[in-house]
Image (spheres, rainbow, N blue to C red):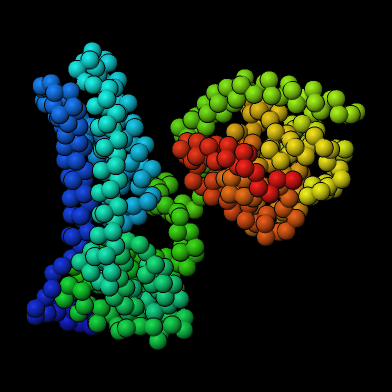
Amino acid sequence: MAEPGVKNDIDSFSGEGVRRRGPVARALFGDIIQFIDFILVIVMSVAVAEIYHVFYLDIPIDLQNYTAAGIMGATGLTALLRRDGYYEFDEIAKASKAVRAIVSRWALVLLGLLAFAFALKISDNFSRVWLTAWSGATLVSVIAVRFSASLMARRMSMDGGVFARRVAVVGATALGVKFSEYAKKSPAGTFIVGIYDAGLVNNGDGHENAAKGDLNDLAEAARSGEIDDIVIAVPRASGEDMAKLVRRLSILPVSIAICPNIHWLDHLGGAISDVGGVRVLSLYRRPLEGWGGVLKTVEDYVLGAIALLLLSPVMLAIAIAVKLQGKGPILFAQKRHGFNNAVFKVYKFRTMTVAEDGDVVTQAKPGDARITPLGAILRRYSLDELPQLFNVIKGEMSLVGPRPHALAHNHQYAQMIENYSGRHKVKPGITGWAQVNGYRGETSETEQMAERVRYDLAYVDNWSLFFDIKILFLTVKAVVFPQNAV
């Protein structure tokens, strides 16, 4: 007896002139790039040594040492990139995202090689000039190869090219249509062969016209080598019908996957994880888990203490100036929400004639009469924020993170902006990703605050030590050349 939607002779289908391109080209491409990277690192080691010693210093060298160093460096770099998935085709196609990974992993390998050389007391066998030149030459060449490979991957994936991942969607449904739209935008070269009707009762939702054919047409295309992957998108199918459909499609020589529901596509940044032995989609990861939290804490305490020590003379001078300008305290303390919505007092140098900290807090505006003459200068160059280094040392804030807002503003925007409170999944910071992108000062418009929150959430979801260092450097530029400061 035939099962739903699949004709009886699907098992015996045999096409003439079967075209077998398959996904092997994509799989081998990453291996080829890894091999090229491996050879490049070794060649750069030997070439730099040869040029420096023979052509520049005019002295003979033992190339065995530099070849061995090159092999160790090549093994370390390519192994780390392979482990972290950067030789997968989809990652190769997105070269810009791999640059940071290449830089960080190459730095790690170099540190390991240096430690190894010092431990074995063989560091004197290698020139420091060679090490510096080799490090730079390797970095430039590997990154250049990655961008070239990305360009090749993209070009050869267009319009069903040799690197294109040819996908057929089973299910003339809203889910099937939306999946197709998302997949076509992928930089990794996904080519949608077509949407095929699953032939199941009550699985349609008004998109039957999008179907290219039925399961019989799908089977013929798959047998003819026109399809690499099948994605099943029939969210309304019963468990029994889904099991039958999967069983029938499993005889085809292609990969088969399931897109469970339309909400799955709303969380494209999620990752598949294992919870209690069951595969699930992780929508949000816990920020700063594992070593991330340790690195962040060390960063805050070490850099915070150094900054506090170096900036103490400046802070003392500002404190004296604030005291001399008139009556009132030197510091202004205001309650803010911190990590996990915990309330703490943030410290600032007093820049205004008022000290609002109640249910209503009026934001400062350009030309605000409440701002003192000295306060205007301090606020323009963010010098009023320096006392927050004490908040960092106390563990209430980080050097980098979403800026904390007054409690009154927090309550207001939490009701108006979706996922606003997601900012509190990490400690607030003295500076942040939103601030270095121009979102600082007054945010009287909801749209402005929504954009600031968008940058804050992007920081929370993409934190790394490198990201923090980048923001700190950009903060220096933002302080020297201030914009939107009030």
Q: In this image, 16 relative to 90: left or right?
A: left
Q: Position of residue 47 (x, y in %)?
A: 16, 34
At 81% across and 48% down in the image, what residue appears? 367
Q: Residue furthest right?
A: 327
Q: Position of residue 97 (x, y in %)?
A: 38, 49
The image shows residue 43, relative to residue 420, as above or below, that is: above
Front-lying residue, 8 or 354:
354
Q: Position of residue 332 (x, y in %)?
A: 80, 32
Front-lying residue, 362 or 379:
379
At 79% across and 50% down in the image, what residue appears? 365
Front-lying residue, 47 or 290:
47
Residue 16 makes an appearance in the image: yes
Quadrant for the C terminus, please: top right
Query: Quarter of the image holding residue 385?
Result: top right
Q: In this image, 440 relative to 263: left or right?
A: right
Q: Position of residue 322 (x, y in %)?
A: 81, 28
Q: Residue furthest bottom?
A: 209
Numbered circles on residues, count: 0
Residue 419 makes an appearance in the image: no
Quadrant for the N terminus, please: bottom left
Q: Residue furthest top?
A: 121
At 29% across and 75% down in the image, what residue appears? 193
The image shows residue 108, relative to residue 414, as above or below, that is: above
At 26% across and 54% down in the image, what residue appears? 148
Query: Quarter of the image holding residue 84?
Result: top left
Q: In this image, 83 relative to 302: left or right?
A: left
